[in-house]
Image (spheres, rainbow, N blue to C red):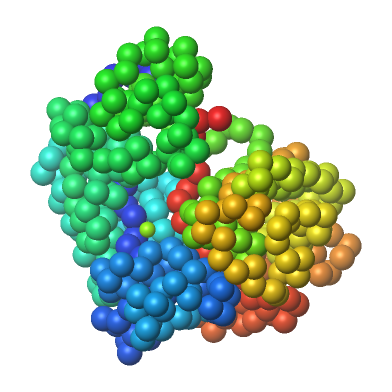
Amino acid sequence: MGINTEPKNYQVLFLDMNSFFASVEQQVRPELRGKPIGVAPYTGDSGCIIAASIEAKRQGVKICRIGEAKKIIPSMTILEARPALYMLYHKEIRKVIEKFTPYYRAMSIDEFAICLTPLDQNYNNSIKLARKIKQTIKSEVGDYLNCSVGISTSKFLAKMAASSQKPDGLVVLNLGQLENFYAKLKLTDLTGVNFRTEARLNFIGIKSPLDFYNCNLSYLSTTLKHAGKNWYYRLRGYEVDDFISKTKTIGHSHVLEPALRDKNSALSVLHKLVFKAGYRLRQENYLAGGVYLTIGFSDRTTFSQSQKSVDFFSDNMTFWQKIELILKKCPWPGQPVSPSVSAGPSPDGSQGGPIYLAVGAFNLKKNKGEQISIFAEIEKRKKLATALDHINDDFGADTVISASMMQAGDSAPDRIPFGRPRYDILH
Ligand SMILES: [Mg+2]
């Protein structure tokens, strides 16, 4: 795979669970089914909804502040996120996929990419496989869980296909359909294109995905360097994004939407980014010996610091505590100092609110499982993180929930907003 291999149809099946956290809550609490609900790491009005149920989305609520959502749907139920529960369901969905194929990778807590075997690299069989997986998730994991599936030449296109029909979609996107497909999209609909990237593309004359697709290789390579070359091939269906990242940092970044450019929302999203990065650390079996944090503000200042650590770690709680230490040094221009105080809305970010967030781990080494910490607390956290990630048949739901309560005893509950996995973006 890569840019030396011509793209072929029916290579990747991408499965994206719809409104995952909210649907899991509705699965375990039938009284919430059919109703608009939102899941949030903090449930005060200034908190931020990180997953809205399909019913809430239909009425126009997406990721936004709770107060904003309640203006649209006053009766909306807001629940505090329960990460251990979502991880349990993630694991159950993995088990279903493993029944059908060993060639898959979890891209995030609610997304899976499956490499199709030659037998399934055609219309009928790939569709049949998709339907079987969808049905088995419903029959063996939860009848209220829907997913959208995309089938295409690469992970990127299969994910785009999956995103094009929500909820409960099944879309095949072939090479001959690309122009028509791109014609219906905005630039920010492309996975990996955020507000900042969109502005940069506009600047070089690219206003739409179709413009982007029609750009030739030399123009993209000249204006956007290596990233431009990757986009040229990615948009044509080549497998540019490797299944396993070879980088020596694991991190995530996010541009806050205008309505969320305040300190509270930024902290919620930072929790989410730390959780995602921690998950990948463990998934790729790394220990980290350092963390970094960058926050870009609307007054054009940037706060950026990293910290090397003596103790290697891979659990979310240690990760978050290290980020919190760095956060204490952050000046938050124009914002109240205490995280418990609502910053109030700053829709245009004109008061110096946060716009861009990036967090990650570096100084990575493979976890050989030999390091035994002399600190019992550190051992406990390591085990907890692993248990949450790899809940197996021997662990019942009660075991997992008591583990999460142990963690909650220390500080805030494990707050986990979750969203897109990291794909290559323009640097
Ligand atoms: Mg999803």
Residue 84 vs residue 167, the one in the foreground? 167
Residue 257 vs residue 408, the one in the foreground? 257
Residue at horizontal 47%, vertical 16%? 223
Residue 282 vs residue 33, the one in the foreground? 33
Residue 94 placement, left or right of 120: right
Q: Where residue 109 sits: x, y (%)? A: 46, 58
Q: Quadrant of the C terminus?
A: top right
Compared with 19, 237 (above or below) is above
Compared with 30, 299 (above or below) is above
Q: Quadrant of residue 375?
A: bottom right
Residue at horizontal 45%, vertical 51%? 420
Residue at horizontal 37%, vertical 42%? 188
Residue 376 visible to the viewer:
yes
Q: Quadrant of the N terminus?
A: top left
Residue 237 visible to the viewer:
no
Residue at horizontal 32%, vertical 52%? 15
Quadrant location, ligand no. 1? bottom left
Q: Where residue 255 sits: x, y (%)? A: 53, 48
Q: Quadrant of residue 209?
A: top left
Residue that sits furthest to the left in the current view: 124
Residue that sits furthest to the front in the current view: 350
Residue 206 placement, left or right of 184: right
Q: Where residue 372 sits: x, y (%)? A: 82, 58
Residue 301 placement, left or right of 111: right
Residue 139 vs residue 230, the one in the foreground? 230
Residue that sits furthest to the top in the current view: 218
Give the mark count.
0
Q: Where residue 239 sits: x, y (%)? A: 37, 29
Residue that sits furthest to the bottom in the current view: 31
